[in-house]
């Protein structure tokens, strides 16, 4: 027997080990190749910067004000004027009333959040490890009410949930959005939101990305009926959008981000998902993550 | 009244009147047959005339139909405010699509040739019926 002869069992073990390593290599390299959520976000920043040369991500949340010179058209921007400010103050006062209301057990909504609710909105939506769901700020408000045996507020109740959500966010006004995507289950929710963001839906076959990535910065004309004068508007870039919600809409109502998703889905000719559905929560999680690092501006933009 | 509605009403009439078009058995039926033929001739004539009644410009501007000016600029139009910049200039669309069938196909479903387009597939998803697409094509040729 040669000195370096290798026994048959050892040969089999070595072959098995080699096959195992070879099988694992693609998995390992695939795991290595998968960009982090932040890397994916930065890729999107590059795509949008290519579409909006000369602008910076910090400008994008202001939409028309910042993008008129880039789009090169005659856009009538809606500035943050005195009337709007008065409305905003009224809305926030209504929201504060609901925020401060004492529960039957003597507590209030502020008791359910760290730091009395100050500087927490920038972390919403957040992944809840216990329920393995992406939880929005509005859901957390309702969870608090439920915990203290109070009646929950319907998410579509724009005259109560709208101002309350706006007030809760105003406690974080100016704070930079800081969503975390830690565990793989959270990444799954983010990916699910991203998939919906990119999926074409409805009779008109639009995806969120169709307008707010591929055509971001373009001018489009809105007219309610034939013969009515059109209003020009800029298709806002996806990054920065989530910083300015809820928004005041004409008539003094407050529209939450998920209500706007529903409006867009209807515009695409699709039956919208319910407010608070897992689909819209994941979409809000991804969409808000895109604005990471950008400051919250509550009710700063009046949308037409 | 759209062409589809017209076609549906004609075909339903045809079903209801099927018993009327059996072969004549005697000369007494001749008047009956002539009457039936006249009705069908009138219906056929109305079906032929229907496409001309569809106003391409109206469809072009209607937010629930074409809504074309929402995305396309029409720089030289004196009547349509075309300042949008999502799609290409429609006044120059004749040069882009010299072949009428290609222009029609683009309106029917542009994603077949431009997968990332935001333009709705007007024909494939039945936002516009065939006669309405024809009317818009004719209107585009006048721009």
Image (cartoon, coloured by chain):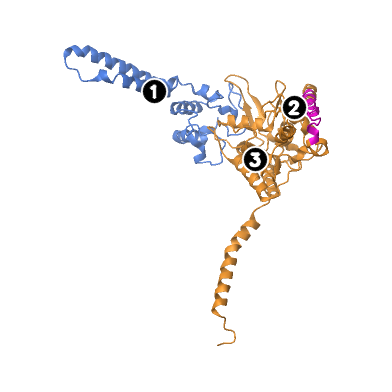
Have a look at marks 3 and 1 and say if they share a chain. Answer: no
Cα–Cα span, label 2 and label 1: 50 Å
Quarter that holds the N terminus of chain A: bottom right
Tell me the subunit letter for badge 3: A
Q: Is residue B72 visible?
A: no
Query: How many C-alpha atoms fall within 10 Å of the one at disc 3: few (<14), some, or many (≥20)?
Result: many
Q: Which mark is residue B8?
A: 1
Quarter occupied by the C terminus of chain A: top right
Report if residue A292 lies within the magenta region: no
Which segment did they paint magenta?
Answer: A90-111
Which residue lies at the image location 65% right of the left edge and 57% below the top edge?
A: A32
Residue pictured at 63% horizontal, 41% vertical: A193
Q: Nearer the viewer, residue B90 or B111?
A: B111
Find residue A180 and report its horizontal and vertical position in percent: 73, 46
> Is residue B53 or residue B43 the one in the foreground?
B43
Spot the residue most to the front. A105
Labels 2 and 3 share a subunit = yes
Across and down, in percent, residue B70 comes to 59, 28
The nearer-to-camera label among 3 and 1 is 3
Q: Is residue A261 visible?
A: yes
Q: Name the residue carrying label 3.
A: A282
Look at the picture and state if A282 lies above or below A105: below
Do the residues under discs 2 and 3 have CB atoms within 8 angstroms?
A: no
Drawing shade for chain A = orange
SS at circle 1: helix
- Mark 2 — residue? A163
Q: Colour of chain B?
A: blue
**Which quadrant would residue A229 be assigned to in this image?**
top right
């Amino acid at each position: 027997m040669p000195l370096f002869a290798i026994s048959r069992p050892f040969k089999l073990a070595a072959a098995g080990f080699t096959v195992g390593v070879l099988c694992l290599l693609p998995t390992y390299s695939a795991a290595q190749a998968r960009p982090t959520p932040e890397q994916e976000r930065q890729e999107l920043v590059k795509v949008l910067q290519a579409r909006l040369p000369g602008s910076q991500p910090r400008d994008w949340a202001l939409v028309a004000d910042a993008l008129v010179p880039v789009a090169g058209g005659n856009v009538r921007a809606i500035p943050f004027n005195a009337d709007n400010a008065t409305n905003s103050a009224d809305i926030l006062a209504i929201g504060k009333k609901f925020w401060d209301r004492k529960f039957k057990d003597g507590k209030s909504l502020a008791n359910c959040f760290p730091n009395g609710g100050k500087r927490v909105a920038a972390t919403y939506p957040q992944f809840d490890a216990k329920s393995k769901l992406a939880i929005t700020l509005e859901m957390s408000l309702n969870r608090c009410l439920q915990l203290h045996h109070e009646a929950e507020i319907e998410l579509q109740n724009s005259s109560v949930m709208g101002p309350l959500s706006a007030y809760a966010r105003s406690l974080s006004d100016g704070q930079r959005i800081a969503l975390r995507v830690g565990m793989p289950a959270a990444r799954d929710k983010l990916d699910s939101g991203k998939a919906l963001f990119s999926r074409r839906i409805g009779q008109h076959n639009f995806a969120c990305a169709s307008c707010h990535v591929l055509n971001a910065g373009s001018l489009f004309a809105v007219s309610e009926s034939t013969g009515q004068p059109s209003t020009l508007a800029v298709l806002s870039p996806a990054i920065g959008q989530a910083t300015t919600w809820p928004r005041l809409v004409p008539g003094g109502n407050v529209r939450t981000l998920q209500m706007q998703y529903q409006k867009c889905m209807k515009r695409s000719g699709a039956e919208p998902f319910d407010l608070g559905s897992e689909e819209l929560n994941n979409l809000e999680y991804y969409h808000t993550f895109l604005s990471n690092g950008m400051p919250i501006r509550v009710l700063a933009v009046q949308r037409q | 009244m759209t062409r589809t509605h017209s076609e549906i009403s004609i075909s339903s009439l045809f079903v209801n009147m099927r018993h009327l078009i059996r072969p004549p058995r005697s000369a007494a039926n001749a008047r009956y047959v002539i009457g039936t033929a006249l009705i069908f001739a009138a219906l056929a004539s109305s079906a032929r005339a229907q496409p001309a009644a569809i106003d391409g410009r109206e469809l072009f501007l209607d937010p629930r139909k074409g809504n074309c000016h929402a995305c396309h600029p029409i720089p030289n139009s004196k009547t349509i405010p075309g300042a949008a910049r999502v799609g290409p200039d429609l006044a120059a669309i004749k040069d882009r699509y010299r072949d009428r069938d290609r222009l029609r196909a683009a309106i029917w479903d542009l994603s077949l040739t431009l997968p990332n387009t935001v333009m709705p597939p007007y024909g494939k998803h039945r936002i516009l019926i065939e006669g309405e697409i024809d009317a818009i094509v004719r209107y585009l040729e006048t721009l």
